[in-house]
Image (cartoon, rainbow, N blue to C red):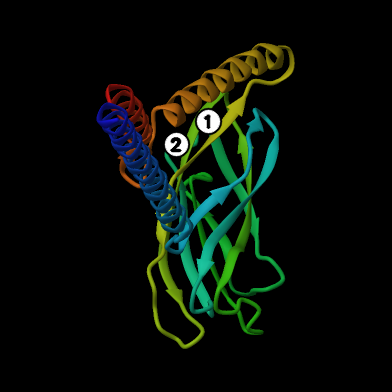
Amino acid sequence: MIRPIQTLTTRITRDSTRTAAATLVVAAAVTTFALLGAVTATGTTAAQTDDPTVRLVGGDVTASETATFDVVLTSAPDGLSGYYLRLSLDGTDVARIDGAAYPDAFSMTNEPTTEGDGGTLLLEAADLEDSVQAGAADVPLATVELTGVAPGEARVSVEPVQFDTDSGDRFQPATQSDVVTVAAEDSEDGAAGATEDASDGSDSLGDGATGAAGSVGGVPTVVLVGAAAALLAGGVLLGRRL
């Protein structure tokens, strides 16, 4: 009668130990994935917090043709009462600035002025009707006309000389240089388009590879997922040994 009781006691002890080990593994896995979710949320919040930036927004232009591009302020936390900025091309052998206009929200204080054979543009305007309120985003400051001169790329730089909030305080937006691509005209358009498509495909593959091996909130995704897998595998092995 003693041996069956001891055997039963041993089985109960082993079952309890396995249950405890399984519970520990599950708890560790849940904690790991919760950490991953928290890091992801933190990274998303950080990505959504942008400082005011002035940049040029638009597409490409064909040689001998003119296209319009918008100069945009990405955010105005304290509103915008007026601005003065300078826009420059790194050379006029690829493209040139032919003119600009202000949106209805701004009143012209100085007419848009081009200098250096279309290599520089000076813009100055005021928001007299309080159209740009505090917290506004993607505020169009002006529309710029760029004419393609020859196939190639032209880098555009924006220099915020002076920006004022609704209360009259000055603030300094960040700047983002952009590249305008001038495509060949007529018969060369097909070849240029094929080159662009091939380039776009390479970029997409590159982005995908970066995303697959990227990081979340500064912590490599592979490390987090690998840690969770290791915990689960270790728990299963422990359960088998027990």
Q: Amino acid at mark 1?
A: Val
Residue 133 location (% of width, % of height): 60, 79
Q: Amino acid at mark 2?
A: Gly
Crowdedness near tag 2: few (<14), some (14–19) or many (≥20) residues, C-alpha within 10 Å: some
> Where is residue 19, by image quadrant?
top left
Q: Which mark is residue 94?
A: 1
Please indicate, yes or no, whether residue 169 appears anywhere in the rendered image.
yes
Residue for point 57% across, 25% down: 150
Q: Work out which quarter of the rendered image holds the N terminus and state it.
A: top left
Label 2 to label 1: alpha-carbon separation = 7 Å
Q: Nearer the viewer, residue 161 or 94?
A: 161
Q: Looking at the image, is 22 positioned above or below residue 52?
A: above
Q: Work out which quarter of the rendered image holds the C terminus and state it.
A: top left
Residue at the outermost front position: 1
For residue 136, side relative to residue 161 (left or right): right
For residue 123, side relative to residue 230 (left or right): right
Which residue has dot 2 on it? Answer: 91
Crowdedness near tag 1: few (<14), some (14–19) or many (≥20) residues, C-alpha within 10 Å: many
Q: Looking at the image, is 191 positioned above or below residue 55?
A: above
For residue 144, side relative to residue 22 (left or right): right
Q: Nearer the viewer, residue 109 or 103?
A: 103
Residue at the outermost bottom position: 167
Q: Which mark is residue 69?
A: none
Query: Dot 2 lies on which element?
Result: loop
Residue 138 location (% of width, % of height): 59, 61
Q: Nearer the viewer, residue 228 or 115?
A: 228
Residue 132 location (% of width, % of height): 61, 76
Do the residues under discs 2 and 1 have CB atoms within 8 angstroms? Answer: yes
Residue for point 66% across, 84% down: 129
Q: Looking at the image, is 225 positioned above or below residue 218?
A: above
Residue 208 location (% of width, % of height): 50, 26
